Amino acid sequence: MSSSSNEPTITSYAQAPAKTISANGVTYAYRELGPKGGIPVVFFVHLAATLDNWDPRVIDPIAAHRHVITFDQQGVGASSGTVPATIEAAADDAYDFISALGYKTIDVFSFSMGGMIAQDLVVKHPDLVRRLVLTGTGPRGGKDMDKLVGTTYSDILRATLTRSDPKEFLFFNRDAEGKRAAKAFVERLSERTVDRDKPIGTKAFQTQLKAIQRFGRSAPSDLSKLTQPTLIANGDNDRMVPSVLSNDLHRRIAGSELVIYPNSGHGGIFQYHERFVPVAVEFLTR
């Protein structure tokens, strides 16, 4: 999979062209950037997120070294179809998308719900994923994961009342440092000005929430099967997917590496992007 010599290498997510590919009757919207050839890093996005929800301060430095692919899940953003009712079905969609692109081996960078989907993908297709990054996420059947639904709705309400982006409440602590990081993060998400995605619909969002709740209440997967190098990261005060679940993942996945950032929440990797990204780049280029 090499690009033609006359195609310039794009390393800015704000500039990455909008593309589509069809698989099993679904048209998936995706963007790619970075040097082509070799194994791509496929990014698995969070609850309610579209292509426009990736922090360019995380994507761009990885794309300086690696071929990066981001995609909209079925029924979200510019992808067609309807949001699947389970995390496992979302993993099947991801497999269809990756297969349609022609890849037999990928690295995965995932955040939050994306990390749940990535785990189900690896459990079902262990040979597909070479290296795995799991951030702000937890295992199937993880303790208190189903409480995410209540937290999400209450924070959406708080955000509405203060005319803020819900991510400012859901991803960051409400101290001075957290509020500053939240505002900076939300601003970075608007750096792209062309071909922006349309936000997720209410019904699709509710379907995703129910899928996460079901994932949280179901029997744990056997993560001892995961043999690929795995990097796990989170903030120390994740109110969405409790930080203890990152420790839980670390215990279950043999040889995994764990990084917990101080005084930060679900979006710890975005608040501490200057510290986190070099760790992620080193891990993904090792």
Image (cartoon, grey):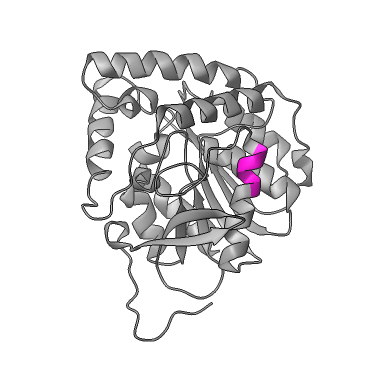
Residue at the limit of the structure toward the bottom, as seen here: 5
Q: Which residue is drawn at 33% across and 65% down?
A: 11
User: Is residue 119 positioned above or below 264 on the image?
Assistant: below
Up the image or down, 259 lies above or below 164; here it is: below
Would residue 34 be visible to someone looking at this image?
yes
Q: Which of 183 and 231 is in front in this view?
A: 183
Estimate the x, y position of residue 221 in percent, counting from the top left.
Answer: 75, 35
Where is the C terminus found, in terms of image quarters?
A: bottom right
Q: Nearer the viewer, residue 181 or 150?
A: 150
Magenta stretch: includes residue 7:
no
Q: Residue at x 42, y 29 (%)?
A: 262
Q: In which quarter of the image is the N terminus?
A: bottom right
Measured as percent of width and height from the top left, residue 190 is found at 23, 44
Kindly indicate the quadrant of the structure image that contains residue 214: top right
Horizontal side, residue 280 vs residue 179: left or right: right
In magenta, the rendered stretch is: 88-92
Image coords of residue 231 (percent x, y):
57, 47
Classified by dominant secondary structure, the portion drawn in magenta counts as helix
Depth check, front residue: 282 or 3:
3
Residue 106: tell me if it is visible: no
Residue reaching furthest to the front: 25
Q: Quadrant of residue 13?
A: bottom left
What percent of the width, then of the height, locates residue 138?
Answer: 60, 31
Question: Does residue 238 lie above or below 45 as drawn?
Answer: above
Name the residue rendered at 65%, 35% in the picture.
249
When the figure is inspected, residue 187 is found, relative to residue 42, above or below; the finding is: above
